[in-house]
Amino acid sequence: MAVQDKFADEKLSDEELDQVAGGTVGEYDELRDLFGTVKRHVSSGGRNAHTFEGRLNDEEIKSWLRSNLNIDAQINYKRWFPWQDGDPNVYTRNGQSLTHEQVVKEIKAKLG
């Protein structure tokens, strides 16, 4: 006789789903989307310099969080398989854990 999962028929609400860790790729993409694109200047030895638009990378995001919100971030996406989720990002301020949702809310407030 098989054991029936007592939660098999339950579904999470949208609010409950928002609290589930989005995985590193989803979290990283959400952070990058918050900042939009930035102008980047590329030069190759002074010749053929040009400017293009690009999104912030993980190191730039971590630096921004540290400088602007005093948040230390560990961004855990898998560079070699970006379509596979891994561990959620880890955020702390003064030794206190923050959720991804809290960090997103603070970024939005700071960016206006």
Image (spheres, helix red, strand yellow):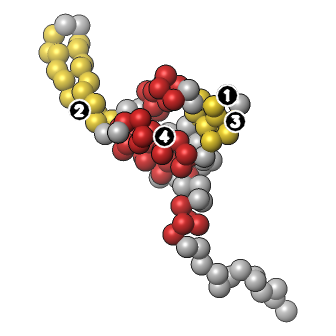
Q: In percent of the image, x 28 and y 36: which residue is there?
A: 37
Q: In percent of the image, x 42 and y 40: which residue is there?
A: 109
* Three-letter residue code for mark 1: Asn
Does 80 sit left or right of 2 as displayed? left
Quarter of the rendering containing residue 107: top left
Pointer 1 with pointer 3, Cβ within 8 A:
yes
| Nearer-N-terminus badge (1/2) | 2
Other residues around mark 2 within 10 Å, as few (<14) / some (14–19) / many (≥20): few
Quarter of the rendering containing residue 96: top right
Q: Residue furthest right?
A: 1
* Res 103 visible: yes
Q: Name the residue under label 4.
A: 106
Q: How many angstroms separate mark 4 from mark 3 (CA)?
A: 15 Å
Q: Mark 1 points at which residue?
A: 94
Q: For the residues carrying marks 1 and 2, which lies nearer the camera in this image? A: 1
* Three-letter residue code for mark 3: Gln
Q: Which mark is residue 96?
A: 3
* Three-letter residue code for mark 2: Glu
Looking at the figure, which quarter contains the N terminus? Answer: bottom right
| Nearer-N-terminus badge (4/2) | 2
Q: Mark 2 points at which residue?
A: 53
| Nearer-N-terminus badge (4/1) | 1
Report x, y in % for residue 49: 17, 16
Report x, y in % for residue 36: 31, 39
